[in-house]
Amino acid sequence: MNEETQSQGIPIANFSPDIQGDLYLLCTNKDGLITTKQLEVAMQCMTNYEQGRIAITSMDPKLQSKIEVLEPDQEGYVSFGKIEEALMALIDQKQRSRYSTFFWTALTVAGIILLASVFGLLYLVVDLHKDMQSMNGVLTDRATGLPMQTASTDLTVKNGVIVSK
């Protein structure tokens, strides 16, 4: 192989048909030529895959510093197990976040209902206070001054009509 062929790449059509599809995937510029550098990167990826790790430098630069936190002493590699652990922790955190959101929403709704009940009862007490007063320990009607009378709750049904006994 001469140096000009190495810099340009080797035509993928020169390889056996069973690996041509894989080589087209490696060909980043899609010109039908595979360079030695592209083959070298593919071999490193295959070796790292068999060892259960992936090169941090092969990832997006924005992620590299965050991924290095998973395994800082692995000289630029992170294991698939650590990536799996990080993803499981992320999924667990998202699920707890959903539960927390549901809890706070339910608590807010219960609080609103409680406040509405308190204001409703307060309104009822104030409204009743306008019509009644207490004189000498007896509840009386403000307008007439007569003691308040309560109906008997001892009721019966006669001829289909509810009447007191």
Image (cartoon, rainbow, N blue to C red):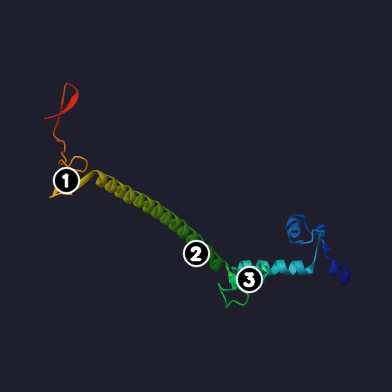
Q: Write the residue at 87% across / 72% down.
A: 3
Residue 56 vs residue 154: left or right? Answer: right
Q: Write the residue at 17% across / 48% down.
A: 134
**Residue situated in front as seen by the camera: 124 or 131:** 131
* Residue located beneath label 2 in the image: 89
Q: Which mark is residue 139?
A: 1
- Toward the top, the furthest residue is 159
Residue 128 vs residue 87: left or right? Answer: left
> Mark 2 belongs to which amino acid?
Ala
Q: Secondary structure at mark 2?
A: helix
**Residue situated in front as seen by the camera: 103 or 110:** 110
Q: Quadrant of residue 74?
A: bottom right
**Residue situated in front as seen by the camera: 152 or 112:** 152
Q: Quadrant of the N terminus?
A: bottom right
Q: Mark 2 and mark 1 in contact (Cβ < 8 Å)?
A: no
Q: Position of residue 110 (x, y in %)?
A: 37, 52
Q: Is residue 105 above or below residue 82?
A: above
* Separation (CA) of disc 3 from disc 1: 79 Å
Q: Quadrant of residue 154?
A: top left
Q: Mark 2 and mark 3 in contact (Cβ < 8 Å)?
A: no
Specify few, some or many for label 2: CA neighbours under 10 Å numbering under 14, 14-19, or 20 or more. Answer: few
Indicate which label's residue lies in the foreground, 3 or 1.
Answer: 1
Specify few, some or many for label 3: CA neighbours under 10 Å numbering under 14, 14-19, or 20 or more. Answer: some
Q: Position of residue 160 (x, y in %)?
A: 19, 22
Indicate which label's residue lies in the foreground, 1 or 2.
Answer: 1
Specify few, some or many for label 1: CA neighbours under 10 Å numbering under 14, 14-19, or 20 or more. Answer: some
- Toward the front, the furthest residue is 144
- Mark 3 or mark 1, earlier in chain: 3
- Mark 1 or mark 2, earlier in chain: 2
Q: Write the residue at 76% across / 62% down.
A: 28
* Residue located beneath label 3 in the image: 64
> Mark 1 belongs to which amino acid?
Leu
